[in-house]
């Protein structure tokens, strides 16, 4: 089996588990993960945090994103520019007004707000994934947007993967261009 086939096998198995998880269980597990995240010094000290805007099967980040905006923290979210095949970090002020369904149906900033954010100002990036391993290797959805983006980050920026316990394995298949996260936070 090739590494590409191995990755796809992992994706399909985990996606099936994600889709089987009830919304109530997803919410409870997400709350546990976010509480653990909030206790981390890297999060507490972060002045600028980049959130992914969660889909219906991912660890739900929306409540914490809204909380950070209410507290006046700077919040950045991804925008996928398919013309240049890149993920762009964009600051938002108000989730209700600033986010619209975009690429792949995921909420992202309105087009008129898209201005690349100075990556040197980022403190923490929350990274989605289909699967992670204990060393921080990450298996995404296969388009490479996050790998290309994470490669551009300054060395001081911390990257945390958020995952349900069944998304973390002893190891996941990786290739040279796959970028790891600094820490994976789960509900266990």
Image (tube, rainbow, N blue to C red):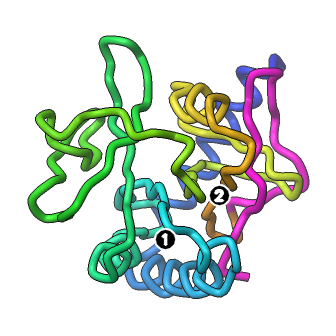
Residue 179 quadrant:
top right
Q: Residue at x 71, y 31 (%)?
A: 7
Please say whether residue 101 is one of the residues in the magenta stretch: no
Q: Circle 1 sits in a helix, a strand or a loop, which is it?
A: loop
In this view, the residue in front, 7 or 48, is 48
Image x and y of residue 24, in percent: 40, 84
Kindly identify which residue carries mark 1. Answer: 21
Looking at marks 1 and 2 on the same chain, the residue that comes earlier in the sequence is marked by 1
Specify the quadrant of the image occupied by residue 177: top right
Q: Position of residue 113 (x, y in %)?
A: 18, 40
Q: Quadrant of residue 71?
A: bottom left
Which residues are drawn in magenta? 167-188
Q: Position of residue 67 (x, y in %)?
A: 34, 81
Identify the image quadrant of the C terminus: bottom right
Task: Name the element at disc 2.
Answer: strand
Q: Residue at x 37, y 50 (%)?
A: 77
* Dot 2 crowding, Cα within 10 Å, few <14, some 14–19, many 20+: many
Q: Position of residue 65 (x, y in %)?
A: 36, 70
* Distance (Cα) linking label 1 and label 2: 19 Å
Q: Which residue is mark 2?
A: 161
Vertical side of 171 occupied by 147: above or below: above
Q: Residue 177 colored magenta?
A: yes
* Residue 44 in the figure: left or right of residue 53: right
Which residue is farthest top? Answer: 83
Q: Main secondary structure of the magenta part?
A: loop
Considering depth in this image, is 140 or 84 the residue closer to the camera?
84
């Amino acid at each position: 089996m090739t590494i590409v086939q191995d990755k796809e096998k992992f994706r399909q198995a985990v996606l099936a588990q994600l889709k089987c998880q009830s919304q109530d269980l997803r919410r409870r597990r997400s709350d546990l993960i976010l509480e653990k995240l909030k206790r981390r010094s890297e999060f507490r000290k972060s002045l600028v945090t980049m959130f992914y805007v969660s889909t219906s099967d991912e660890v739900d980040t929306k409540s914490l994103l809204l909380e950070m905006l209410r507290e006046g923290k700077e919040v950045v979210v991804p925008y996928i520019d398919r013309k240049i095949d890149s993920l762009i970090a964009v600051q938002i002020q108000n989730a209700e007004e600033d986010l619209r369904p975009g690429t792949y149906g995921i909420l992202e900033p309105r087009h008129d707000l898209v201005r690349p954010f100075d990556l040197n100002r980022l403190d923490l990036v929350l990274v989605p994934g289909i699967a992670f391993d204990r060393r921080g290797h990450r298996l995404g959805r296969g388009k490479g947007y996050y790998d290309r983006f994470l490669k551009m980050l300054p060395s001081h920026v911390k990257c945390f993967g958020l995952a349900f316990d069944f998304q973390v394995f002893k190891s996941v298949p990786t290739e040279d261009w796959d970028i790891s996260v600094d820490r994976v936070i789960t509900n266990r």
